[in-house]
Image (cartoon, grey):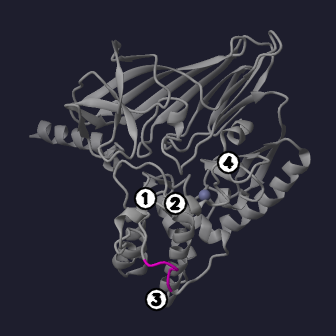
Amino acid sequence: MKLLFFLICTSLSVFADTDLTHAPPSFSADGKKAVFVDFKRAEYKITYDAENGYAKSVSTIEFYMPEAGYPIFDSVTKPTQITLNKKLTSEKLISTPDKASVVRRIETPLERGLHTMMIWTPLENGTRFNLRRKKWGHVSSGFFIRDLTDRKFLEQYVPSNYEYDTYQMEFDVKVIGTKRWHSFFANGEITKINENHYRVTMPQWYRSSSVYLHLVPINRFVRWYLDYPSIDGRKIPVTIYSNYNFYNRYVKTKAWATLKELEADYGPYPHDQLIIYGTGLRGGMEHAGATETSIISLGHELQHMYFAKNIHPVNGNSGWLDEAIASWRDKGHQTYQKPFYESVNLANHGAYTRKTDKRSYEYGRSFMAYLDHLLKESGKPGLKDFLRHYFQKRQRTGVTTEDFKSDLEDYANMSFGEDFHQYIYGGKEENSHLKHNHQKSFENPHHPQLTDEEFESLI
Ligand SMILES: [Zn+2]
């Protein structure tokens, strides 16, 4: 009996420890069952060869397979070699059942349990070499994410998983074949081994949408290393870098003012560091405790340090929350008696959707303004007060739209079922075809679609 009890407890703890609660369902493709897995640990060894102009990564990933079948991972770049439990295997690119995305499936069947895969991939995206001077070549490489387009998280650069999965990541980053030194910015704990070799350990709660890495020749940017005095007494290391001193000065002034506002609203800044890469381009993008951004979008991105990159969405159906909350702040925390629209689907796309609906800013902001009204009408202080509670409860975790809704209902002691059904799940959309069209005009100034040239210029 005791043994049975022990066995039950151990198997329960295996499940309690997994992120699979939010994984999309397994599915069959050409007769083989593709299974979403739980990454436990990944070590990424990345080598940039500045003499020959190529980069590659070797990824060692330990994962838990929850049922028998064929494991899923993703890498935009096709792997050149894969081993599974030290045996050579292969992978296949397959569509998800709803055609919302594609993933890579390993072609060896596995039993439930822990396994290890090693994946060799060229690193092509986000990487630029300058080889003009022999022995003095250099490389720039930026792991920057985007969330309005499919497959633009970490899988653009190295093998990773869907956003539901948190796992321990380590990056070993090396530049060879040059005498030129390189600097390295990353949102984890960095160990410098030498001027061209760095290791970084990321916090355990990071996922594919959290990571920020930027490798550049040492003289590329003007950097400032500062401390931000948090309201909780911590001195938070802040790295600001851009092309100009005056730009860093603007960034610092605006960042300090915004952090003060956010700490007063939601509590102490929730990361161990802050990296701000001040770009000359429109818009920006948030990562966990790091952002590449214009001055204009800086406030928006810093708010994402709480909502989006501390509390993370677990899938494409939850991403609207962050843009709705950040846009609600952008427009000055408005209160509306009703949303400006009848019904829209922001959170009811297929289970395999990874990207955020582009209409989340305008529609979501309007919905947040409406929630503020409903809360105030019921005698509560308003949405900001709720968000503070929500943040304190959920920090460093992943959330779904339903989590947000149920927290809101607990807080207000009232039901929001009808409101979410109509305004967020598109329950009253006349024509369901509409939900996939007309997204182009909803571009937000803080996250504009950059051209390839513009994106390249960031790196
Ligand atoms: Zn945003």
Q: CA distance from mark 2 to mark 3?
A: 34 Å
Q: Which residues are magenta?
A: 338-342
Q: Amino acid at mark 1?
A: His
Q: Give residue 439's mark.
A: 2
Whether 88 is drawn above or below 223: the answer is: above
Q: Amino acid at mark 4?
A: Thr
The residue mark sitting in front, 4 or 1, is 1
Residue on which disc 3 sits:
378
Compared across the picture, whether 257 is left or right of 337 comes to right
**Local SS, label 4:** strand
Residue 289 belongs to magenta span = no
- Of 9 and 44, nearer the camera is 44
Q: Does the magenta stretch mainly form a helix, a strand or a loop?
A: loop
Density class for disc 4 (Cα within 10 Å; few <14, some 14-19, many ≥20) is many
**Residue 79, how many percent across, how many down?**
46, 21
Task: Tell me what residue is drawn at x 22 percent, y 39 percent.
Answer: 11
Q: CA distance from mark 3 to mark 4?
A: 37 Å
Q: CA distance from mark 4 to mark 2?
A: 25 Å
Density class for disc 3 (Cα within 10 Å; few <14, some 14-19, many ≥20) is few
Q: Quadrant of the C terminus?
A: top right
**Local SS, label 2:** loop
The residue mark sitting in front, 3 or 4, is 4
Is the Cβ of the residue at disc 2 closer than 8 Å to that at disc 1?
Answer: yes
Residue on which disc 1 sits:
436
Q: Give residue 423's mark.
A: none
Q: Earlier in the sequence, mark 2 or mark 3?
A: 3
The residue carrying mark 2 has its beta carbon less than 8 Å from ligand 1: no
Q: Amino acid at mark 2?
A: Gln
- Of 237 and 420, nearer the camera is 420
Displayed quadrant of residue 277 = top right
**Local SS, label 3:** loop
**Local SS, label 1:** helix
